[in-house]
Image (spheres, coloured by chain):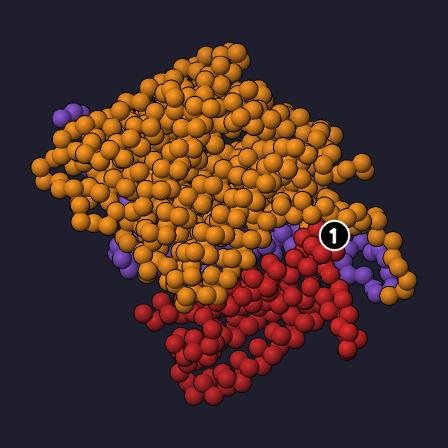
Amino acid sequence: MKTLIFRSIAPYLTALVLLFSAFVTLRGHNEPGGGFIGGLLAASAFALYGIAFGVPEARRAMWFHPMSVAGTGLLLSAISGLPSFFRDTPYLTGVWTTAPLFHFDVATIILFDIGVYLVVAGAMTSIALALEDSGEG
Amino acid sequence: MEAVFSLLVGLFFAAGIYLMLSKAIVRILLGIVVFGNAVNLLIFAAGRIMREVPPVMAPDMMQLTGQTANPLPQALILTAIVISFSFFAFLLVLTFRTYQEVGTDDTVKLRVAEPEGEVLPPMGY
Amino acid sequence: MAGPIDITGAMITTATPAGDWLAIVPIALPIIAGASLLMLRKRLHWQAPIAVATLALVSLATMALFVRVWTSGTVVMTMGRWLPPFGISFTVDVLGALFACTASLVALACGVAAVQSIERPARRYGYFPFLLLTSVGVNGAFLTGDIFNMYVWFEVFLISSFGLLVVGSTRAQLDGTLKYGVLNLIGTTLFLIATGYLYGVLGTLNMADIVRKVPQLDGAPLMTLAALYLTAFAMKAAAFPVQAWLPAAYHTPNVVTSAFFGGVLTKVGVYALLRVLVLLFPMQLAGLSGVMAWIAAVTMVLGALGALAQSDIRRMVGFLVISGVGVMLSGLAIGTGPALAGGIFYALHSMVALTAFYLLAGFIADRAGSASLHVLGGLSSVPLLTGVAFILMLCIAGLPPGSGLWPKIMVVRAALEAQHGWLTAAILVSSLLTIITLGRFFLLTVWRPAVADAVLAEGKRSSWPGPMLALTAVALLMGLYPEPFVQAASRAADGLLDPAAYVQAVFGGQN
């Protein structure tokens, strides 16, 4: 897929979809949306980039290895359950505090959601790029 | 509505199992995909199909009012879809690699790990 | 938000004792460590130490968990403090803690063995994160109290086990992994189908809740559910007639992987059978008892016959794993307390002894440069291997003072008491066949003088025998001093047969 139109539009489309994936993830905090669907959007953005410019270029654009991204997400999700230990509540109970200076509510739930986002984005990108790779080889 | 779904699930199961009885691995994989979707529909029907009202509460309410869709089967299906999708992707890559290395996707000829015509172990020395 | 909201109807409001967190440590800790290792995929020299340290901590945690469950009863932790059955409960009874503890020890031994035996390319590929995640899945399946959650843990260890199996990507591995993958995926899909029906019938997925609701249902298709679960878990446990994937795959990967899988993964299937059939569907299990007895008998005898026909020692062990599953299943088929206890004890013995035997097979193959009984010989010049081979032979064949003896006696006695004459005969026949198999193995590899064209590969770096020796010592301990293990297995079986305490622990005073 090396057409001029596709290659010209792909970077903008990728950026737009990535932005939208972040929006959907954050929206999922209180409304329909969430890390899972956001992660899928992000993965499709990278897959799109890979189709337009080839897999090596997509890997370079991602900077981190997709599996490292997935690992980071898994770590975030797993540790987001730990603060509830200090509240005498079971694992994965949501803990809310207000950031002292900004009067801004902070929750562990969003950490979990971002973790899910990264796991899905990383794992799905890794699979998509592997399939695109083997398709060409 | 459940009756229609039951028929559909049955059809999916039949198609999936038929495909899985094939010798070609690619068909088996397609069979697994159909099979997996049959299961998803099954869970969906098992959770009772209701009005398509999302189970979302207004901010000032403490309880759901009226009949809404059952959210649990959807959560289960979402999990199952993710899992079956990643399995399918993995097995697809694996099948492709195997085809590259062994040169066949015929399960009858795929006997690298368990070669034919092995001799029995020695009876003594 | 308008004022404080009364949440007592929906959420747990009592404080969670810090000790209950032990239920989550065997999951959370390896996930965190595995995820960190995925992030640090370039730091190859960090992988092994972090993985081994994590597995050691997990072993300690499961031991502490076992002590806690033993002294103060079933430990429950409900995620996100939503009241059960809505929140996912981790419910750890004696059975779960016992299996988790043994599996974690075996995983630790395999992790230590992997330090030397896993080469750099496999580390770069992510061997240690996969090992950790597999052990997460296994522990999760043992500790969870929610049936759908159990399905998820099955998938977790299944997909990480694919990763472990295919490391190296030789032709035989690709072939074996493909068969393993497809058949196991069908098995877990059956599990999911059964769970879908279960939810349709009962409207709940929490095991304690299912225990409460099953007796209230009359005329529900519970037998179908039990049969579906039996098929699904028999597939995971490699019972006849759905055992074909195990001997096709388990001899292909690195021997440490084989050891871990052969020891632990089939026992997850056995555990699930115990948990689901005995705890959730006891009436239906009684109805299925005849079928189970046939399955058990054929699995045992066929496994032993298969082992007898193999010249490759690792494939031989694969069939011995299957034969052992048959003994555990006959405990289930008989269904009385002592029989179940025997089956559980046999599962513990099998985890330890067969993992050690796989490691031994790898050791012999390293040393002699071949794993074929046609070529091996002259190992009597290596006293360490001879000793380990002798002890493990006694353990697996069920000869005194090996660890296989006592559980087999328990099962045989229970079978006789329950008038299962031919099942007893099948156990004894399969034991005889196993003795012949292992006797011949010992005869050919140890006593036979070295075959001329097989030179002992002295120059080759041989792996560290520590993990194998440790596991062998544990197996011998089980045989010499079986009393605590028998007690633990009996209490685990009692907990399954009388689930009142289990339900009480999850739901507390409320109904």
Rendered view: C488 above or below B82: above
Q: Nearer the viewer, residue C48 or B41?
A: C48
Residue that numbered label 1 is attached to? A88
Pick the quarter of the image with the N terminus of chain C. Answer: bottom right
**Count of numbered marks:** 1
Pick the quarter of the image with the C terminus of chain C. Answer: top right
Determine the residue positioned at 53% across, 36% down. C99
Q: Nearer the viewer, residue C161 or C469?
A: C469
For mark 1, does the 10 Å Cα neighbourhood hold few (<14), some (14 to 19), or many (20 or more) residues? Answer: some
Chain drawn red in the picture: A
Residue C60 point in image, percent of width and height: 54, 44
The image quarter in which residue C163 lies:
bottom left
Rendered view: A28 above or below C332: below
Color of chain B here?
purple
Q: Secondary structure at mark 1?
A: loop
Determine the residue positioned at 69% across, 63% down. A109
**Does residue C333 appear to the left or right of C422 in the view shown?**
right
Q: Amino acid at mark 1?
A: Asp
Residue A129 point in image, percent of width and height: 43, 69
Q: Nearer the viewer, residue A65 or B64?
A: A65
Residue C446 point in image, percent of width and height: 21, 30
Q: Could you tell me if residue B109 is visible in this image?
A: no
The image quarter in which residue A134 lies:
bottom left
Q: Nearer the viewer, residue C342 or B16?
A: C342
Residue C354 point in image, percent of width and height: 38, 35
**Does residue C495 appear to the left or right of C106 in the view shown?**
right
**Does residue C47 appear to the left or right of A42 in the view shown?**
left
Chain drawn orange in the picture: C
